Amino acid sequence: MRNWLAGLAGLKNLGHLSALGAVKPPSEYCIGDRVGIFSLINLSQDEVLLGDFD
């Protein structure tokens, strides 16, 4: 429903949560990588920050 409404408003389709694939080790992620429907904004020893910009 969100993707349909977002498309009508000109926002991008984020995909589906079911699109998550196999989990990579944390050392293989880089800033900007896609993690499911989100982008990796920051990664530290104690925190992961995911988000998306419309």
Image (cartoon, rainbow, N blue to C red):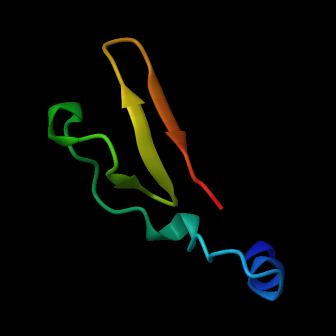
Image coords of residue 53 (percent x, y): 60, 55
Residue at x 40%, y 30% (from the top left corner): 42
11 is higher (above) or lower (below) than 43: below
Image coords of residue 40 (percent x, y): 41, 43
Residue at x 28%, y 57% (from the top left corner): 22
Q: Number of callouts in the render?
A: 0
Q: Foreground residue, 44 or 26?
A: 44
10 is higher (above) or lower (below) than 2: below
Residue at x 23%, y 41% (from the top left corner): 29
Q: Is residue 28 left or right of residue 11?
A: left
Image coords of residue 47 (percent x, y): 44, 18
Image coords of residue 41 (percent x, y): 43, 38
Residue 26: quarter of image:
top left
The residue positioned farthest toward the top in the image shown? 46
Q: Is residue 16 left or right of residue 4?
A: left
Residue at x 82%, y 87% (from the top left corner): 8
Q: Is residue 26 left or right of residue 2?
A: left
Q: Foreground residue, 47 or 23?
A: 47
**Quadrant housing the N terminus:** bottom right
25 is higher (above) or lower (below) than 24: above
43 is higher (above) or lower (below) than 33: above
Residue 30: quarter of image:
top left
Residue 48: quarter of image:
top left
**Quadrant housing the C terminus:** bottom right
